[in-house]
């Protein structure tokens, strides 16, 4: 969230991507950093033990959402 907020303050569109395990933490961080509306997209948890093929599926599932967040 820190990077997303920093880039947004600089005028560069940014979006944080994290697993669904971190929804509450990302919301709290965005609010603590003074940018509750910071863009974030969540990929299905877990990702730590996912192989390349599984990660590709997870990425494919959110790519449209990421693009929308960056171009909104």
Image: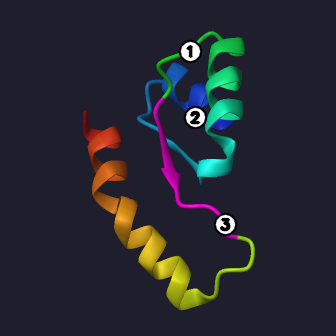
Q: Position of residue 15 (x, y in %)?
A: 48, 41
- In this rendered view, identify the residue nearer to me: 62 or 9: 62
| Residue contact at pointers 3 and 1, CB within 8 angstroms | no
Residue 4's disc is 2
Please provide the residue range marked out in magenta: 39-47
Q: Is mark 3 on a helix, strand or loop?
A: loop
Please tell me which of labels 3 and 1 falls first in the chain. Answer: 1
Work out whether 67 lies above or below 30. Answer: below
* Mark 3 closeness class: few <14, some 14–19, many ≥20 residues within 10 Å: few
Q: Which residue is drawn at 58% across and 34% down?
A: 4
Q: What element carries label 1?
A: loop
Q: Which residue is drawn at 55% across and 31% down?
A: 7
Q: Which of marks 3 and 1 is in front?
A: 3
| Residue contact at pointers 3 and 2, CB within 8 angstroms | no
Q: Where is residue 70 in the image (x, y as percent from the top left)?
A: 34, 41
Q: The C terminus appears in which quarter of the rendering? A: top left
Q: Name the residue under label 3.
A: 46
Estimate the spatial distance between the alpha carbons at disc 3 and disc 1, rounded to whole Å. 27 Å
| Residue contact at pointers 2 and 1, CB within 8 angstroms | yes
Q: Name the residue under label 1.
A: 35
In this rendering, position of residue 38 left or right of residue 66? right
Q: Position of residue 12 (x, y in %)?
A: 44, 33
Q: Nearer the viewer, mark 3 or mark 2?
A: 3
* Mark 1 closeness class: few <14, some 14–19, many ≥20 residues within 10 Å: some
* Residue 49, quarter of picture: bottom right
Please tell me which of labels 3 and 2 falls first in the chain. Answer: 2
* Residue 45, quarter of picture: bottom right
Q: Position of residue 34 (x, y in %)?
A: 63, 9
Q: The N terminus appears in which quarter of the rendering? A: top right
């Amino acid at each position: 969230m820190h990077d997303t907020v920093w880039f947004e303050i600089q005028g560069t569109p940014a979006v944080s991507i994290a697993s669904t395990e971190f929804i509450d933490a990302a919301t709290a961080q965005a609010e603590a950093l003074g940018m509750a509306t910071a863009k974030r997209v969540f990929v299905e948890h877990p990702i730590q033990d996912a192989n390349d093929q599984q990660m590709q599926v997870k990425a494919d599932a959110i790519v449209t959402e990421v693009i929308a967040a960056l171009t909104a």
